[in-house]
Amino acid sequence: MVMKKRYPPDSRTYAIMAKPIGASCNLSCRYCYYLEKQDLMAQQTKLMSDVVLKAYIRQNFAIHGNNAVVEFAWHGGEPTLAPLDFYIQALNYQNQYGPGRIIRNTLQTNATLLTDAWCAFFAANHFLIGVSIDGHADLHNRYRKNRFGNTFEQTMAGIKLLQKHGVAYNTLTTVNTINSHHPEDVYLFLRELTDYMQFLPVVECLPASYENASGQRFAMPAGLHSPSMMHPVTDFSVTAKDYGTFLCTVFDLWRKLDLGEKYVQIIESTLANLNNHPAGVCVHEALCGHAGVLEMNGDLFCCDRYAFEAYKLGNILETPLADLMEKNRSFGMHKTLGLPDECLDCDHIRLCFGGCPKDRFLLSRDNQKGKNYLCEGYRQFFKHIKKHSGDQSIPLIF
């Protein structure tokens, strides 16, 4: 009898965020860092071509392990500005190039353009939808506007359509200078809408004069290929202290009201790190670099927050996606290698891992570059959550 050699399961994964309509959006949120890319990248087309779409889907399967969940993450701008037929064709290519593979489609939206047709399609094809919403009307409408004004009612109408059709969705909430002072209001509002919440701190810096002259509204983030300059932060950015207080309040409310029932990403990632499991979110992992962003012309960048020419890896029509992502290793390793000694000696390093490199523009106590602007807030939150980490009533939810 000839014994077949058994190979271990191959579950290597990447997270390639695709932008089928580039930076185009029907909203003009004041804190949006991507809206200006339409002009900065001189985007002439309005939709990813069929050639790029096919190449993306075929190559995305190729870079994932045979046993991996292959995710197709659709972002913008506002990805529902692309016609529904675009996503129908994308699924056709997924079926063509990935028979037998485990496939997950996710889409991040402001929900204002959703219709019964969109939601029926999402439900039939098991899309996971992320909805951007910043709290109740007064908080949401402060920064999330379109050319007609406020957008809260349209967003809520979209959520109701998702609920009507039984579409799986979660919420993504920016934490800014306004809603950071109302953590209880935000959490109590969101818990009525969803079982899964993500909180994203808004930290944007004003551009240098040469960046402003080129049309940038915000400074290029500090990083491997950009200077760690201490630009002034914008007036809508959350402070480190307020972010820490916000997270601590959310944790206390979750623990009191929803422990074991609701999923708050940063709480779960912190509990995972405390228990030596993967955090599941790049911000609080030791390394990053596995989450490139694909523009509609096929250009691949190191990260969604680093869609600048200095961080362009190449184009998938010219170089295979696998080779481009291999080039991203140095960017990913810089997440740890670029930390100052103060961070590496911190009690919370295995929970924080320096946070997102884009926010690491402060100097450490001994004047080394690379300390996170949100450090004080992270310290506050991690110290708070550690107090309860031995509470046997707190389960890990994965």
Image (cartoon, rainbow, N blue to C red):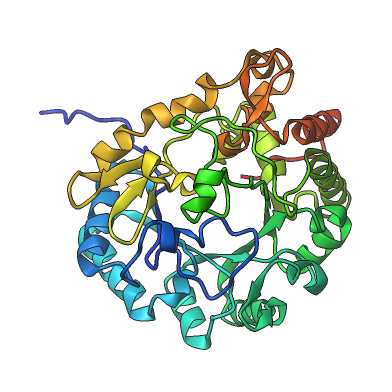
Can residue 151 be seen here? The reply is yes
Q: Is residue 353 left or right of residue 181?
A: left
The residue located at (57%, 38%) in the rendering is 358
Judging depth in this view, the residue of 344 and 285 nearest the camera is 344
Up-down: is 38 above or below 375? Answer: below
In the picture, measured across the screen, residue 353 lies left or right of residue 192, that is left
Among the 4 quarters of the image, the one containing residue 51: bottom left
Furthest-bottom residue in this view? 116
Q: Is residue 138 left or right of residue 373?
A: right
Q: Is residue 52 left or right of residue 85?
A: left
Query: Toward which corner of the image does residue 52 lie, by quadrant?
Result: bottom left
Residue drawn at x 44%, y 76% is: 81
Where in the figure is residue 308, as x and y percent of width and height? 42, 46
Answer above or below: position of 156 versus 294. Answer: below
The residue sitting at 45% across, 69% down in the picture is 24
The quadrant of the picture occupied by the N terminus is: top left
Which quadrant is home to the C terminus?
Answer: top right
User: Residue 125, how many percent across, how many down?
Assistant: 42, 71
Q: Position of residue 49 (x, y in %)?
A: 25, 68
Q: Position of residue 390 (x, y in %)?
A: 82, 28
Residue 88 vertical position relative to residue 40 in the rendered view, above or below: below
Residue 74 visible at all:
no
